[in-house]
Amino acid sequence: MKKSPIELINLVFSCMMVLLTFTGAIVFLFTDLLSDRAYGNKRIILGVVFLAYAIYRSYRMYTAFKSEKKSQEE
């Protein structure tokens, strides 16, 4: 079964969000970029929140793929 254009756009957007939030987490946790605005505990908390959101979005994408694959097999 072929995906509709809206489903493809949703998939691309989801992948971009995962990459963007994971990159944001890496930037805040392991670099000094924007250290003048976000520093100390705020910086660590922001990095952890970004990382948690990236993991959450990845899990949602995985479960959507898994359920779609299962429905195609039936």
Image (tube, rainbow, N blue to C red):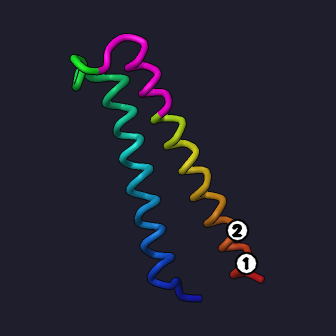
The spot of residue 50 in percent (x, y) is 45, 35
Q: Which residue is mark 2?
A: 67
Name the residue rendered at 31%, 20% in the picture.
Answer: 38
- Above or below, 40 relative to 6: above
Q: Which one is in front, 66 or 43? A: 43
Asked if residue 74 lies left or right of residue 41, the reply is right
Does the magenta portion include 71?
no
Q: Estimate how packed mark 2 is, as few (under 14), some (14 to 19) or many (20 or more) residues with alpha carbons within 10 Å.
A: few
Q: Estimate how packed mark 1 is, as few (under 14), some (14 to 19) or many (20 or more) residues with alpha carbons within 10 Å.
A: few
Part of the protein shown in magenta: 38-49
Corner quadrant of residue 36: top left
On residue 71, the disc is: 1
Q: Amino acid at mark 2?
A: Ser
Asked if residue 63 lies left or right of residue 55, the reply is right
Under circle 2, the secondary element is helix
Give the quarter of the figure containing the N terminus. Answer: bottom right
On residue 63, the disc is: none
Asked if residue 62 lies left or right of residue 23, the reply is right
